[in-house]
Image (cartoon, rainbow, N blue to C red):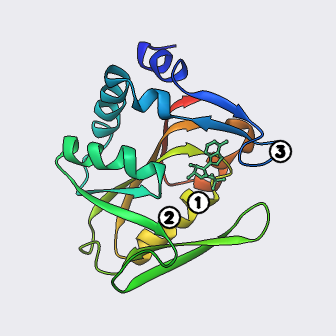
Amino acid sequence: MTDLQTLILDRIRDIPDYPKPGVIFKDITPLLADHEAFAAVVEELAGLREVDKIAGIEARGFILAAPVALRAGAGFVPVRKKGKLPYETLEASYDLEYGSASIEVHRDAFRPGDRVLIVDDVLATGGTARAAVELLRRAGADVAGVAVLMELSFLRGRERLAGVGLHSLVTV
Ligand code: AMP
């Protein structure tokens, strides 16, 4: 266990049965409230890949991706839930436990071949990250990888990102 992993694990708390019974929600707000831990996480994520842009997934992904983009000298692109972006969008749908959801990105968010790292807080089933990879590729991005603070390995999301390059700072 590295110092960074200890710093992260000590500051992510489990909230049982949120937002619904049976789910253990990983609450990252104690980590965000701690300057040393937040700065260390941003530093680590910013050093992973040489990229042109960092794409953050709504909403907790934004909180991580924006400072990572600044630190990495890259642009920031929001990947939002359907209906939130003001300009023309591309859309990708994916299955949730019950029903489905859609995410969108502005159709002109990337120049062709832009190298892009996708950032989110938690990788669970991997459905959201997989949809984001496909969406960004359709938007002309060269997806350099997916980076998350925490991977829930028992949900096997990594398998859905085969060939993409997943980097998780901690795995539980
Ligand atoms: P999934 O598509 O199943 O990988 O879910 C990933 C998205 O849902 C991420 O944007 C996470 O922020 C959120 N998420 C899923 N499960 C959890 C959890 N147990 N704790 C916190 N966030 C979660």
Q: Please say whether residue 71 is visible from this viewpoint.
A: yes
Q: Nearer the viewer, mark 3 or mark 1?
A: 3
How many numbered dots are placed on residues in this image?
Answer: 3
Residue 77 picture location, percent across and down: 32, 63
Residue type marked 1: Thr
Disc 1 under 8 Å from ligand 1? The reply is yes
- Work out whether mark 2 precedes mark 3 in sequence or the reverse, and give the earlier one: 3
Neighbor class of circle 2 (other Cα within 10 Å; few <14, some 14-19, many 20+) is many
Q: Earlier in the sequence, mark 3 or mark 1?
A: 3
Tell me, yes or no, if residue 172 can be seen here.
Answer: no
Instruction: Say whether residue 67 is left or right of residue 60.
Output: left
Q: Compared with residue 139, is residue 129 higher up or lower down, i.e. above or below?
A: above
- Residue 150: horizontal and vertical position, in percent? 55, 35
Circle 3 packing at 10 Å, graded few (<14), some (14-19), many (20+), is: few
Closer mark to the observer between disc 2 and disc 3: 3
State the image coordinates of residue 53 (x, y, percent, origin top left).
27, 58
According to the image, label 1 marks what residue? Answer: 128
Quarter occupied by residue 88: bottom left
- How far across and down, in percent of the image, does residue 164 sit? 49, 54
Marks 2,1: beta carbons within 8 A: yes
Rendered image: mark on residue 21: 3
Disc number at residue 132? 2
Q: Identify which amino acid the numbered label 3 is placed on.
A: Pro
Q: Amino acid at mark 2?
A: Ala
- Residue at 64 percent of width and 55 percent of height: 160
Locate the C terminus and report the quarter of the image it occupies: top right
Q: In the rendered view, does 113 fall on the left or right side of 155?
A: left
Numbered disc 2: secondary structure: helix
